[in-house]
Image (tube, helix red, strand yellow):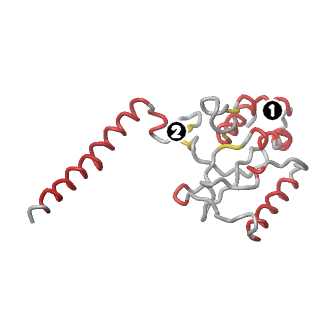
């Protein structure tokens, strides 16, 4: 009995420290130092209304928009509550059929060769907001045509929205689809 009382006290003390004080301090520091990131990296429209997050992909299917990487989340695409990959391997017939359908859909829009994998395969989280610059490039003709814009102008916009590797060494260059599509809307609604 003498041993149980200190054990219970330690559980309570560490619960208060680790479950209350520490998270509150870290959250406070994060909101002070990185206010945008700590609150979800929301992207707003011209009126200040939040329309999405720079960290979570958004569904776009209209030909006048760049299409994101496919989502593997269930119920509806890009559902953050259902984050996760499909866990289907390259020999799974359903997965192969899904990828083939995505390739066909891209070919139907005029993409004939060099389809980047990130346009037909979902990311591990199913929520990736970025596509590769190559995935954006193959979509330029479709987007430019749908908006009545010159391809060079759209290409410059893609180039301007291409983010470099993090710290110059981590990851690959990438394009945030939501930010790019919002920039397109500002140029040619």
Where does the image place residue 111, in percent across and percent down from the top left? 87, 49
The structure residue drawn at horizontal position 57% and vertical position 43%, both measured from the top left corner, is: 55
Where does the image place residue 120, in percent across and percent down from the top left? 76, 55
> In the rendered view, would you say 42 is above or below 120?
above
Circle 1 sits on which residue?
Answer: 155
For the view shown, which residue lies furthest in the left direction?
Answer: 2
> In the rendered view, would you say 157 is above or below 139?
above
Name the N-terminal-most of marks 1 and 2: 2
Query: In the depicted view, which residue is nearer to us: 77 or 3?
Result: 3
- The numbered disc on residue 41 is 2
> In the rendered view, would you say 176 is above or below 94?
above
The structure residue drawn at horizontal position 30% and vertical position 42%, both measured from the top left corner, is: 22
**Disc 1 packing (10 Å; few <14; some 14–19; many ≥20):** some
- The numbered disc on residue 180 is none
Element on which disc 1 rests: helix
Where does the image place residue 156, in percent across and percent down from the top left? 78, 28
> In the rendered view, would you say 78 is above or below 53?
below
For the view shown, which residue lies furthest in the front direction?
Answer: 3
Q: Are marks 1 and 2 in contact (CB under 8 Å)?
A: no
Where does the image place residue 37, in percent across and percent down from the top left? 49, 37
**Disc 2 packing (10 Å; few <14; some 14–19; many ≥20):** some
Q: Which quadrant is home to the N terminus?
A: bottom left
Query: In the depicted view, which residue is nearer to us: 21 or 176?
Result: 21
The structure residue drawn at horizontal position 49% and vertical position 42%, both measured from the top left corner, is: 40
Image quadrant where residue 137 sits:
top right
The structure residue drawn at horizontal position 65% and vertical position 41%, both measured from the top left corner, is: 178
Residue 177 falls left or right of residue 75: right
Residue 42 falls left or right of residue 68: left
Counting every numbered tag in the picture gives: 2
Residue 145 falls left or right of residue 44: right
């Amino acid at each position: 009995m003498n041993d149980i009382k200190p054990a219970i006290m330690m559980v309570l003390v560490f619960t208060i420290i680790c479950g209350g004080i520490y998270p509150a301090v870290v959250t406070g520091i994060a909101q002070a130092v990185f206010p945008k990131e700590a609150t979800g990296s929301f992207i707003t429209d011209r009126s200040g209304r939040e329309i999405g997050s720079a960290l979570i992909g958004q569904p776009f299917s209209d030909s006048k928009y760049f299409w994101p990487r496919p989502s593997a989340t269930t119920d509806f695409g890009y559902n953050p509550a259902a984050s996760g990959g499909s866990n289907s391997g390259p020999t799974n017939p359903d997965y192969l059929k899904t990828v083939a359908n995505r390739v066909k859909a891209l070919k139907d829009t005029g993409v004939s060769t060099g389809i980047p994998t990130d346009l037909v395969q979902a990311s591990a989280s199913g929520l990736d907001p970025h596509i590769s610059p190559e995935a954006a490039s193959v979509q330029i003709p479709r987007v430019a045509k749908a908006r009545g814009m010159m391809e060079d102008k759209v290409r410059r916009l893609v180039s301007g929205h291409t983010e470099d590797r993090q710290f110059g060494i981590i990851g690959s260059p990438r394009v945030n689809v939501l930010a790019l599509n919002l920039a397109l809307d500002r140029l040619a609604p």
